[in-house]
Image: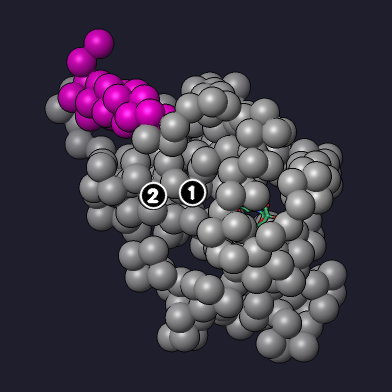
Amino acid sequence: MRAAPGYLARVTAPIVAIDGPAGAGKSTVARQLARRLGFTIIDTGAIYRSVALAAQRAGVSWDDDPGLARLLDAGLGLTFRGERVLLRGEDVTEAIRTPEISRGASVVSARPVVRQKLLQLQRDLGRAAPRGAVLEGRDIGTVVFPDADVKFFLTASDEARAQRRHAELAEKGLSVPLPEVLADQRRRDKDDTERAIAPLRAAADAVVVDTTGFDLEQVVERCFREASQRLKHLISGQP
Ligand code: DC
């Protein structure tokens, strides 16, 4: 446990981990939870996406380990400004969300060299948050911050997740048939859960929240109550 109960002051601000598969509602819940707690939100998927974009721009293949290592060693130049993502000062928030970069992010995130080199960056970003951080990803509670103060693992049925994704795409004016969204999601789930390094799984001490059939506002409320309760206990040192 990271907390020092009683009169001992905490050295670092609290860390909340939110993991889970695509479409379980992580982004919405993480963002709203961070806002309500007054914490910094760190979208770690955006970091993998930025690596894919930076590699593409530098002419480095997404599976070129030495090339990716050089790119990361030179420094990505990644900064978060609120919910905007800047790469060497350029706002790439939208550019990292294209289907092509989603594919690239999936490839680079399976490369051990990339995961290893991004570990420190994610830890530094989390620890630098002045009041606390909510980190959203796949391996936050298991690998990046195994000692996080609160861990949530959001899940939902395949169909519910595909329907959310389908609705999101429709909102952007993209009409992709639901069976296609579902098939693509199953492929990504398989890649995420079966990869050798940092596979997607719930930490043993994570609060598992099944969001199937729930409005995400209700999920935010539940997570907020749980997090407030746990953080209060950790900081005050009360039983
Ligand atoms: O959550 P997202 O779709 O923005 O994530 C982009 C890709 O990065 C996706 O293929 C999963 C991967 N990822 C990861 O492997 N580990 C994380 N902590 C976050 C994302």
Q: Quadrant of residue 13?
A: top left
Residue appearing at x 54%, y 26% in the figure: 213
Considering the numbered disc 1 on the image, is that residue within a helix, a strand or a loop? helix
Disc 2 marks which amino acid? Arg
Query: Which residue is identified by label 2?
Result: 31
SS class of the residue under badge 2?
helix
Q: Which corner quadrant of the figure contains ligand 1? A: bottom right
Magenta-tinted stretch: 218-239
Whether residue 11 is visible? no
Q: Nearest the camera: 131 or 99?
A: 99
Find out if the beta carbon at label 1 lies less than 8 Å from the nearest ligand 1 atom: yes
Residue behind label 2 places its C-beta within 8 angstroms of ligand 1:
no
- Position of 75 with respect to 114 (left or right) is left
Name the colouring of the figure: one colour
Instruction: State the residue at coordinates (43%, 36%).
Output: 216
Residues tagged 1 and 2 counted as in contact (Cβ below 8 A): yes
Spot the residue most to the bottom: 58
Residue 1: within the magenta?
no
Indicate the position of residue 201 as horizontal and vertical percent values: 68, 32
